[in-house]
Image (cartoon, coloured by chain):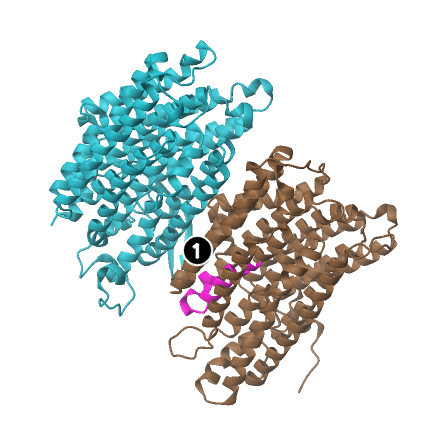
């Protein structure tokens, strides 16, 4: 029956070329492990520099693999799909990692926790995210998720011990531990969900699931029941990863305790990976899971409720936060809510593409803006990690006008004021929600963004409108952080002002 | 269209941005003294450009003029692809408000020349950058005819105004700035939903037709099918049981737009942000706020609510006009009760804009023309009043009326100017204020949608305006001087202060004596709207 394929057949079937962006990054990272091992302490800067080079190589490979004219390519025997969706999110992930690496170099030296493994772990994690956005199979989603998460657990706890062996921060240790336990817990949900879906359909391949679901929900077998429970568990498992309410409890503690660049990194990469998988599972796999003839997908109501809870809780709790990192943590929950609005909209059959595209644009806008905001917070932090409170940025406009201006633009973008990327994202998300007929959800979305204006504007108030009572600490940041801020600022402004850029980039995306 | 492919509208719109770019690159001590000159020159050049537009403007043409339209982006909404386009052009109403904006801008910049706020707060460069950004975004609101780009400009006006109040305002500035920001954002973001719905259902974001695309306003105007345009596009199976007001798509869309505009105008009871913002804003901020920013609201009602949702407009007209009348009386009453002279002028805005609202919802030619003219009149005279208050504050550092008195005796020219501007604001025949208010009252009297009572109570507002403005004038300018200044020099008006008043005084008399020039500009544009409401 089973003949071993020739090498030519194997290569054709596995189509390794289209996996290059992710595999190149992973290979490069493995080489980096060796480089880091043999490079002496005086050459410690080799690792971050080479990490940036690796990201660049992967970015270029990504440009070659996903030319927009190319239709989707299936690789690794159908487990890996390389389409416009993958290509776009790969770029988002790579830029995010680059900004995070730029931030890290400064931070690690300042806190005296500089170790080469840090960059290696970050790169592995981002390779995991790249596999995740290309996953076409429940198994790959799980494996990629672990590849994404496990380095993040370690990174979150990276601040616990200094290079000289002295203890630094219990909070970071707590952060890593919490993240690990809840992450493991959520993976269990995900695997159980995948198992039930496999039980119902007999396959883990998303397109095959898609083709089988119609027949299953039509019948009255127990399979339909398993399928529903399986879909729900998948939603729970991925919900943990993207931190939507009610699966968000871990977020503020983890975000606050982790080293700031790690927080920035995981608030973007883990969310991008998680939402990509969520969209693939729900749209590519289960969009035909329709219980009422001609109606929306069965998971739309659930997604709507989750979106509403996330928007309301994220935005309202963020108001009472005094610590900037905690505030950004809650705001990142709120932003997951806006992406969830797009996911819910994708439940209506003829809006799938528009909703997916809006989710992608939102993620890109969020990536630039959020990383920029975290970079500013990091730049003003003191060496001991304190100084991240809302009062600590008072009068920043006088002492560091350019940084204050950048932070203002990030805050306006997070609020969704026009001429920033954040507005483009919100605009597209609400447009797709309306198209899907989810009027209530769209109205709640815009009203909660007024609430969000309150706490974002407070940051601007403190920077510009109040004078500092205490002396601000001298600028500690290195040019690398300024580069991180500049890249984020450029992205926020360019995609905000040149609106068509974003829509053209995602114009080809279709995963239904 | 000329060789560059840019219409005059585009050039006028982007001139402030040129000034902003120049300002951005001005660093160093020597250039610091020139910041205000660059800003002033930019605003004057913009004004000249807008006058060129006026010269090119053909008042007999009902179409948009000096149009430019470029596709900006394509938005896919489900199966349909909708163009978002950069679409600018002016009709009579836009033209008049563009002129108002470019007219007020140099005056308010001149008004900040002698100001002492920079000695205390510094950041002069940022101040002028925000003024340029503000002018750009306000002009954008008046000339853009694509709903999405309109929303972009509309929201962007918030940011510079927020900073102007927040950085260079008086003691309670932070509270006022945040309140202003949140209040107006809450209103406008509901409009975004309405805009998206309109685009989604009608398949276009352009309000007027250009290049083969039929704009949504024209579609509504020319709709001759069953029921209303929006009914035909609305969700199926809609029941009429709840009545039109709360159970039709059109009515909800109307309200979505109206709330945004009502907060900006402000229509009673959405006015509570206005006294705070006005009182705390620096002089130039107050002048622009009263002069132009509030008109964006009334302009929006005329342009979008009336044109897009005629049936809903008719259904809501008495209610909104009633709120307008309440605003007239309430604003005047509260204004009379103020001890703070800046607050008095601020509340007078609520009262004056009540007239505009009544005029708009009279839904006839006189009402609309009067309302549009009153927008300009109010911009000029209340802008002037805020300049006066600002100059008083520069000298005496108080806003309490009780601290003033006898200013006329020491500053005869200033007193005379203030008298003229106050009289214009209270609507003395022969000056500009009279024309607008009188036409509005005529309109409301002849309206098929409003009754006699509206006219009666609105007229009360005219009398009350005289009461509170004369009270202010009497307290500040007449009687004995309570706090003489330390030096005689302080009583003199600087050249920039005098220069700021000259154009205001000219306009007050010109519009009062020869209003026909301005009515002519409006005739055709107003008629096309009124045609919707002729029974």
Q: Is residue A114 left or right of residue A2?
A: right
Q: Is residue A257 left or right of residue A307?
A: right
Residue A63 appears anywhere in the view: no
Displayed quadrant of residue A326: bottom right
Q: Which residues are magenta?
A: A333-355
In the figure, the shade used to draw chain B is cyan
- Position of A431 with respect to A386 (left or right) is left
Question: The N terminus of chain A appears in which quarter of the rendering?
Answer: bottom right
Write down the colour of chain A.
brown
Q: Position of residue B458 (x, y in %)?
A: 19, 39
Residue B103: horizontal and vertical position, in percent?
Answer: 34, 26
Question: Between residues A147 and B442, which one lies in front from this camera angle?
Answer: B442
Left of B326 or right of it: where is A130? right
**Element assignment for label 1:** helix
Residue at the spot of label 1: A447
Q: Position of residue B218 (x, y in %)?
A: 24, 48
Q: Considering depth in this image, is A403 or B163 the residue closer to the camera?
A: B163
Q: Residue at x 71, y 42 (%)?
A: A480
């Amino acid at each position: 029956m089973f003949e071993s394929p020739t090498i030519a057949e194997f290569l054709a079937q596995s189509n390794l070329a289209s996996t290059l962006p992710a595999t190149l990054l992973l290979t490069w990272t493995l080489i980096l492990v060796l480089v880091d091992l043999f490079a002496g302490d005086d050459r410690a800067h080799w690792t971050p520099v080479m990490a940036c080079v690796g990201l660049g190589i992967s970015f270029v490979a990504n440009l070659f693999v996903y030319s927009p004219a190319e239709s989707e390519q299936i690789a690794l025997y159908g487990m890996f799909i390389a389409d416009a969706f993958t290509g776009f999110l790969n770029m988002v992930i790579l830029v995010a990692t680059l900004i995070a690496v730029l931030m890290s170099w400064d931070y690690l030296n300042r806190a005296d926790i500089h170790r080469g493994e840090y960059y290696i772990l970050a790169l592995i994690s981002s390779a995991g995210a790249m596999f995740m956005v290309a996953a076409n199979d429940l198994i790959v989603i799980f494996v990629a998720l672990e590849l994404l998460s496990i380095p993040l657990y370690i990174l979150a706890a990276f601040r616990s011990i200094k290079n000289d062996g002295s203890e630094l921060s219990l909070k970071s240790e707590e952060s890593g531990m919490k993240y690990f336990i809840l992450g493991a817990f959520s993976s269990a949900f995900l695997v159980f969900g995948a198992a039930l879906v496999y039980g119902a359909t007999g396959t883990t391949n998303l397109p095959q699931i898609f083709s089988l679901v119609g027949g299953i929900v039509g019948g009255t077998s127990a399979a339909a029941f398993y399928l529903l429970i399986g879909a729900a568990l998948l939603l729970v498992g991925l919900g943990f990863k993207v931190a939507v309410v009610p699966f968000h409890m871990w977020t503020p503690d983890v975000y606050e305790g982790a080293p700031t660049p790690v927080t920035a990194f995981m608030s973007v990469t883990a969310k991008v990976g998680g939402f990509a998988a969520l969209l693939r599972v729900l749209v590519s796999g289960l969009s035909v899971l329709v219980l009422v003839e001609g109606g929306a997908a069965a998971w739309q109501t659930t997604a709507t409720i989750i979106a509403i809870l996330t928007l309301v809780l994220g935005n309202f709790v963020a108001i009472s936060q005094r610590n900037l990192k905690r505030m950004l943590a809650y705001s990142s929950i709120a932003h997951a809510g806006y992406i969830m609005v797009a996911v819910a909209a994708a439940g209506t059959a003829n809006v799938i593409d528009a909703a997916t595209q809006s989710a992608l644009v939102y993620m890109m806008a969020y990536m630039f803006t959020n990383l920029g905001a975290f970079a500013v917070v990091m730049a003003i932090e003191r060496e001991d990690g304190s100084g991240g409170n809302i009062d600590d940025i008072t009068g920043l406009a006088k002492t560091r006008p350019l940084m204050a201006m950048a932070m203002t633009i990030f805050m306006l973008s997070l609020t969704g004021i026009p001429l920033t990327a954040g507005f483009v994202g919100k605009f597209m998300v609400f447009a797709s929600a309306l198209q899907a007929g989810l009027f209530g959800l769209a109205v709640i979305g815009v009203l909660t963004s007024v609430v969000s204006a309150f706490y974002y504007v407070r940051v601007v108030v403190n920077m510009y409108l109040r004078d500092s009572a205490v002396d601000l600490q001298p600028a500690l940041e290195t040019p690398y952080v300024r580069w991180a801020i500049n890249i984020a600022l450029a992205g926020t402004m360019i995609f905000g002002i040149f609106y068509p850029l974003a829509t053209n980039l995602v114009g080809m995306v279709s995963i239904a | 269209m000329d060789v560059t492919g840019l219409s005059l509208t585009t050039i006028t719109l982007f001139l402030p941005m040129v000034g902003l770019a120049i300002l951005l690159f001005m660093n160093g001590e020597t250039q610091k003294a020139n910041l205000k000159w660059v800003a002033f020159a930019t605003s004057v050049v913009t004004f000249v450009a807008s006058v060129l537009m006026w010269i090119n403007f053909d008042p007999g043409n009902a179409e948009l003029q000096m149009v430019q339209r470029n596709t900006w982006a394509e938005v896919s909404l489900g199966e349909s692809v909708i163009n978002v386009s950069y679409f600018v052009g002016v009709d009579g109403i836009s033209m008049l408000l563009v002129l108002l904006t470019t007219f007020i801008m140099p005056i308010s910049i001149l008004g900040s020349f002698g100001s002492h706020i920079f000695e205390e707060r510094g950041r002069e460069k940022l101040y002028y950058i925000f003024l340029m950004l503000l002018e750009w975004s306000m002009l954008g609101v008046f000339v853009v005819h694509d709903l999405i780009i309109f929303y972009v400009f509309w929201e962007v006006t918030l940011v510079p105004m927020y900073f102007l109040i927040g950085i260079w305002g008086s003691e309670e500035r932070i509270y006022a700035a945040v309140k202003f920001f949140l209040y107006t954002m809450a209103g406008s973001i509901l409009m975004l939903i309405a805009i998206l719905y309109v685009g989604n259902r009608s398949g276009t974001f352009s309000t007027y037709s250009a290049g083969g695309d039929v704009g949504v306003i024209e579609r509504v105007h020319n709709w001759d099918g069953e029921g209303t345009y929006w009914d035909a596009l609305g969700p199926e199976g809609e029941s009429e049981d709840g009545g039109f007001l709360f159970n039709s798509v059109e009515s909800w869309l109307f309200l979505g737009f109206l709330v945004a505009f009502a907060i900006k105008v402000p229509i009673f009871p959405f006015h509570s942000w206005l006294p705070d913002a006005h009182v705390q804003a620096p002089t130039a901020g107050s002048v622009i706020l009263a002069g132009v920013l509030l008109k964006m609201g009334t302009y929006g009602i005329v342009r979008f609510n009336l044109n897009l949702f005629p049936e809903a407009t008719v259904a809501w007209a008495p209610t909104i006009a009633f709120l307008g009348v309440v605003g007239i009386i309430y604003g005047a009453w509260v204004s009379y009760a103020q001890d703070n002279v800046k607050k008095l002028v601020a509340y007078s805005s609520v009262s004056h804009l009540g007239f505009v609202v009544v005029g708009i919802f009279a839904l006839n030619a006189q009402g609309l023309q009067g309302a549009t003219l009153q927008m300009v009149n109010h911009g000029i005279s209340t802008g002037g009043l805020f300049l006066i208050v600002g100059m008083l504050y520069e000298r005496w550092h108080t806003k309490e009326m009780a601290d003033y008195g006898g200013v006329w005796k020491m500053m005869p020219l200033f007193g005379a100017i203030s008298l003229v501007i106050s009289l214009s604001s209270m609507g003395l025949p022969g000056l500009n204020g009279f024309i607008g208010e009188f036409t509005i009252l005529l309109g409301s009297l002849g309206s098929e949608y409003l009754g006699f009572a509206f006219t009666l109570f609105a007229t009360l507002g005219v009398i009350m305006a005289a009461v509170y403005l004369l009270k202010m004038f009497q307290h500040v300018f007449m009687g004995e001087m309570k706090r003489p200044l330390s030096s005689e020099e302080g009583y003199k008006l600087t050249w920039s202060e005098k220069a700021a008043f000259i154009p205001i005084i000219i306009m007050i008399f010109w519009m009062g004596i020869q209003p026909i020039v301005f009515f002519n500009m409006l005739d055709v544009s107003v008629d096309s709207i009124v045609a919707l409401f002729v029974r």
